[in-house]
Amino acid sequence: MLAATVIVKPKKTKRVARGVATNELIFSAYQATNDMVLPHILKLYVPEGSLVADVTYGKGVFWKSIPAGVYDLRPTDLRTGVDCRKLPYGDTTMDCVVFDPPYMHTPGGTAHQNHQNFEHYYYNNGTENGSKKYHEAVLDLYFKGAREAYRVLKFEGIYIVKCQDEVCANQQRLTHVEICNELTAMGFTVEDLFVVLRMNKPGVSRMLRQVHARKNHSYFLVFRKAKSVRYLPPRRNGQTALHLAEEKPRSTSRS
């Protein structure tokens, strides 16, 4: 006896496959220079024509691979008389802020002497810090710069931060983690993280014994100024107070 033939009807679905197969994507890690990576970040997060403030412009190395006029760029640093902690822009006026301070602090004398050229290069560490030294001074600059960036950014604006971890006083300081923790408390949301691997090998003039792995990578951190969180100063017990503002859910319909 022959078995009955079962006809299976194709399942109906409203989903339509779009796009093309490609590996020409923006990736999270590059062995490259900063000016080779920044265009990828901007392409992903900052539309052309956006008003962008690079508050640690220096010699403009970040922008070497980006044609002039693609963005409405406002380049400033201490050499131009603008401190990243006191920007000459109104509240909620910028689409994007780019921040790249020195990754180490030079308090004077011979401490981090080889790093002074880097600080001079970016023209953004000219203000003395009498209360904090070394890594704490680095974080202080990052945090104060972030508060000012938060002020001038539009809601949903993008904050691009360059940083590098370091060993200070024989302790590992994961700078990118410390920055993410503080900035999320301010009201930023973490959008992305890009790892930049050096093109060459860093070295030292004299070494008796290596204790820690030498850092040969840095980070671009990408934050967005959230609509729903307002930053309040830390409470006396050191905890940060957050006020969650009411926000209507976004419509999923498209015109």
Image: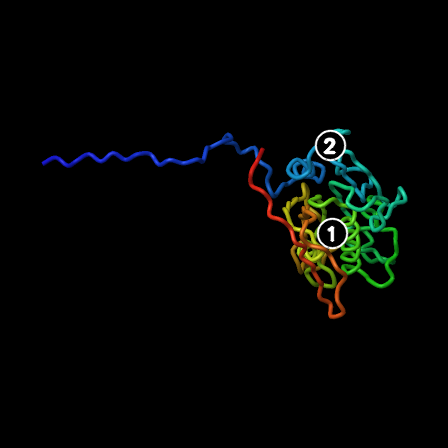
Whether 227 is drawn above or below 7: the answer is below
Q: Which mark is on residue 61? A: none
Whether 229 is drawn above or below 199: the answer is below
Residue 134 falls in which quadrant of the image? bottom right
Q: Nearer the viewer, residue 219 or 76?
A: 76
Q: What is the three-letter code of the residue carrying label 2? A: Gly
User: Pointer 2: what residue?
Assistant: 49
Q: Nearer the viewer, residue 55 or 48?
A: 48
Mark before the other along the chain sequence, 2 or 1? 2
Whether 7 is drawn above or below 220: the answer is above
Q: Please tell me how crowded label 2 is: few (under 14), some (14-19), or many (20+) other residues with Cα within 10 Å.
A: few
Task: Identify the residue shown where x is 71% and y is 63%.
Answer: 240
Q: Residue furthest bottom?
A: 237
Q: Position of residue 8 (x, y in %)?
A: 28, 35
Q: Nearer the viewer, residue 235 or 110?
A: 235
User: Which element type, helix, strand or loop, lies under badge 1?
Assistant: loop
Q: CA distance from mark 2 to mark 1?
A: 43 Å
Q: Position of residue 166 (x, y in %)?
A: 71, 56
Q: Which mark is on residue 204? A: 1
Q: The C terminus lies in which quarter of the figure?
A: top right
Q: Nearer the viewer, mark 2 or mark 1?
A: 2
**Left or right: 13 with respect to 75?**
left
Q: The N terminus lies in which quarter of the figure?
A: top left
Q: Position of residue 7 (x, y in %)?
A: 25, 34
Q: Please tell me how crowded label 1 is: few (under 14), some (14-19), or many (20+) other residues with Cα within 10 Å.
A: few
Task: Identify the residue shown where x is 76% and y is 51%.
Answer: 146
Q: Residue furthest left?
A: 1
